[in-house]
Amino acid sequence: MPKKYVGKNIFKVDAQEKVTGKAIYPDDIYFDDMLYLKIKRATHPHAYLRRIDISKAEKLPGVVKIITAADIPQVKNFGLIIKDQPVLIGIGQKMRYMGDALAIVVAESKET
């Protein structure tokens, strides 16, 4: 971590709204014909992703799209201070913890 961040307070633009309860979260919003998103997360830490088979999930009624790392090659990492967290783990990449994002499922309902 760069020294300019060590021991320093980092200003968060949304802190005031969150601590006062005024923040609006995605679950608070509803639109007609909106889609729902769910993230498939890793269940094993310190493992390598050998393959991901989305063929059965794509055929489920109500599933609109399944997004994997291969679908977003231009977006690699994110992070609050240092962009060192992968957006999605790709084939051959290491899952660092239980919870790393593997795929994004877009569907017509939460139940799907």
Image (cartoon, helix red, strand yellow):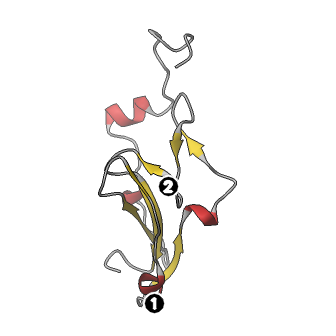
Hey, what amino acid is under mark 2? Ile
Q: Residues within 10 Å of mark 2 (few under 14, many from 20)?
A: many
Query: Mark 2 sits on what residue?
Result: 89
Hey, what amino acid is under mark 1? Lys
Q: Is residue 43 left or right of residue 6?
A: left
Q: Is residue 62 left or right of residue 111?
A: right
Residue at image position (61%, 48%) is: 76
Residue at image position (40%, 43%) is: 23
Looking at the rendered structure, the secondary structure element under dot 2 is loop
Looking at the rendered structure, the secondary structure element under dot 1 is loop
Query: Mark 1 sits on what residue?
Result: 59
Asked if 52 appears above or below 10 in the picture, the reply is below
Where residue 66 appears, as percent x and y from the top left, is 51, 74
Between the C-alphas of marks 2 and 1, the distance is: 23 Å
Which of the 4 image quadrants contains residue 72? bottom right
Where residue 21 appears, as percent x and y from the top left, is 32, 39
